[in-house]
Amino acid sequence: MIAFLIKRLMHAILVMFVISVLAFAIQDNLGDPVQQMVGQSVPESEREAIRERLGLNDPFLVQYVRFAKNAVQGDFGYSYFYREPALEVIARHLPATLELVFAATLIIVLLSVPIGVYSAIKPRSLFSRFFMGASIIGISIPVFLTAIVLIQIFAIGITINFFPPETAWGAWLNSALSTQGNMPSFGRGHDLVHVAGHWDTNLATWDGIKHLVLPAISLASIMLPLFIRLIRAEMMEVLQSEYVKYARAKGISMRRVYFVHALKNTMLPVITVGGVQIGTMVAYTILTETVFQWPGMGLMFLDAINRADIPLIVSYLMIVGVIFVVTNTIVDLIYGFVNPTVKLTGKPA
Amino acid sequence: MTLKKTLLASVIGAVVAGTTMLPMAASAETLRIGYSADPETLDIHEQLSGGMLRFSHLTFDPLVRWTKDFQFEPRLATEWEQVDDTHMRMTLREGVTFHSGNEFTAKDVVWTIERLKESPDYRAIFEPIATVEAVDEYTVEITTTEPYPLLLNLATYIFPMDSEFYTGDTDDGNDKAEIVKAGNSFASRNVSGTGPFIVTDRRQGVRVDFERFEDYWDTETEGNVSRIVLTPIAENASRVAALLSGGVDFIDAVPPNDLDRVRDAQGANLYEVPGTRIIGFQLNEERVEAFQDVRVRQAVDLAINQEGIADRLMRGFATPAGQFSPEGYSGHNPDLTPRYDLERAQELMAEAGYEDGFSVEMIAPNNRYVNDAQIAQAVANMLSRININVNLRTMPLAQYWPEYDERGSDIAMIGWHSDTEDSANFFQYLSFCIDEESGVGQYNYGSYCNEEIDALITQADSETDLEKRNEMLREAEAMLYEDVGYIMLHWQNLAYAAADGVEIEPVVNATDFPYLGDLVINR
């Protein structure tokens, strides 16, 4: 266990090193940060002075060594736009993103497990067919569109008047299909509860949760269909296996067979995929947060790219690299608990 | 509607709940703004940008400000008098206090102008001012190095800062007055101005909160906004959605695709203002020999259908242009209009010996101007009709400017807003013969050079008789029109949208800095 964790720590360091080199190597292609800091009419000589002060004229290696020297001491540089240490900026934006990912994960878990299991047990039922069809559509709709549609329906509201309003049924259909739209469409709201440090939570007030709902649904919409299909496929396979047949032959109640014996083995690959996907979800927050103006890391990163805020971009990429390593480590640990035959360090048992 | 009320209630709590019940005429109102960007810093001299100037108009007051029809309205300066060719005397408003409680006097104006002359962004614009002196408590005298007709235009950029507040050292030993680009200076974190609003809370990139300054000098204004919550919403669709869902009361930069939607929406109103930013192209004469021939330049100009682009691509959200100066500017020449004529363009190409055309590269940004990439695409198609084959590359802003500065392509797109709200500025940056030493022609991508026009503009800039000066500028526009030193497309309009009852129309103008201190809300 200790050996495993140490190995993963080395992984994390290696990942951070590689990412930092890559991020530094591409910075020339990100554009000129000074251009964003000055008015258009500012003469070239002034720009040059600022570039010189920020050390942007030094050769790649000099810049990288200077950065690396500071980075090992925990100083990742100063964001040009926020005028604060880059790590500080990320720390401030991290809780918003984590809460969003948490809420989306919650939606995925609560929906995908029952729907997936049900459609495996009763693959021919109308309900199962509907969800299989819907999940295909769900996978193919880009998250940006999902978000815009959600905003239109639930935040702005839609008025339907296809049906003749003078008839009773028409009026009823019109009003049943129209939406009021009173969900908030952007931001985290003003009703946040301070927890600790930079962490203000959306989860403690009704207003906060209302702000979280639409972004969380649209973020979840990417992964939900995938998980439903994954759980269904795994479950169907498990239900065909010998030990399930044996359990049924023994006369164990179906409920126990499905939810104790079969589900446990179904979840093994789901956990592996899930761990990786949660990491990917952090990447998808870039889109979701932009549409909903959710003040998390994704929005911050997109802004940083537009402004060529290089210290912030490099730090973000490194932090996300670490998040990937950490989630994978946790997944492997959980996997070990669920399936004791797996040995983490890879030595023969 | 219910959300609006709950939000409002949660935002200002008992204050509004109390006032909505009382039958008061001018009740205190909260304005929730969704701008495309928030101010980069709190130091108004750190960066010259639209966001910073909007911020300046909230927390500071200029000496004078522009009215809708480009006249000067007295603010902290009440009167001004040109003593002789190089001296101007300004009388300052009495009884004005800063947010800190300090009294506003002539020394603050002197201090502010001296600081402007230190600012990397403003230094060049304030070059003409030689010295400033406080004659007495409420009079300043500004001396220019040479006769300079645009002193009042500059005065719209002078937002007096609280000299006492910004003087001294911080706890860690830095000068409170220092201007640090993208750094952590005292002035970038603290504000004391004379303006109608005080910053109460600020989380960069997330929101800025303002409250009305109780001792604001302008007691005659009918503005009743007591609190502002500014949320930056960069994504166009999200910003519009925020307004339509009632999440904010006022947004800027409504994208052309959403104009109709906002216009038709219930509970929201659209306000369009003709803008002053010229959008156009520059032909690189250094790289393409054909562009040195005036006939080819004219052919390019004639081949482009400005009206069509403004009508269809911009959906009426632009005013087709035949010159730099928009209406209202000193040099606007009503005779110069777009002259789309494809046949004549083809003839000119043939006359110049380029009947078979040639191939060029074109670059354009894709996130700087309204519909920039689409406009470039349309222009590329139009040029193909006179056999100019265009290979177009578009890129985001951060990459565009470094590419632009290299002048390595054949045609480049650029938009320009005159910092002085005056015609000469366009020429000096976009069409003057490049002179690295003085910095003129800094954005003359095509290395176009017409010394006659340059001389006329330079002469105009030291002509203090404004009638004569305007005549010169109009003539310069006509000369540029004939010589096609810049391919004009249109002036990009401004579009704001506001919720019902938010009377935005009287406080917005072509400069894009709404005067929110005077905003009236009648809900």
Image (tube, coloured by chain):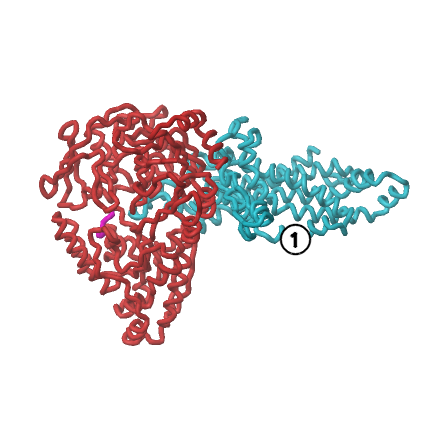
Chain colours: A cyan, B red
Tag 1, which chain?
Answer: A
Which residue is nearer to you in this view: A205 or B60?
A205
Quarter of the rendering occupied by the C terminus of chain B: top left
Residue A223 in magenta stretch? no
Quarter of the view holding residue B101: top left
Q: Which residues are magenta?
A: B420-424
Specify the amino acid type for callout 1: Ile
- Which residue is found at the position 38% from the left and 39% from the top? B501
Which residue is nearer to you in this view: B475 or A138?
A138
Residue A281 visible, this angle? yes
Residue B440 visible, this angle? no
Q: Which residue is mark 1?
A: A136
Extreme residue in the right direction: A250
Q: Is residue A114 above or below residue B368?
A: above
Q: Secondary structure at mark 1?
A: helix
State the image coordinates of residue B318 (x, y, percent, origin top left): 34, 55
Extreme residue in the left direction: B84
State the image coordinates of residue A169 (x, y, percent, origin top left): 60, 48
- Which residue is found at the position 39% from the left and 28% from the top? B200
Label 1, residues with CA under 10 Å away: few <14, some 14-19, many ≥20: few
Which residue is nearer to you in this view: B357 or A121?
A121
Q: Is residue B120 above or below residue B185?
A: below
State the image coordinates of residue A90 (x, y, percent, origin top left): 50, 36
Quarter of the view holding residue B491: bottom left
- Which residue is found at the position 37% from the left and 70% from the top? B388
State the image coordinates of residue A293 (x, y, percent, origin top left): 48, 41
Q: Is residue A227 left or right of B205 when viewed as pictured?
A: right
Overall secondary structure of the magenta section? loop
- Which residue is found at the position 12% from the left and 53% from the top? B468
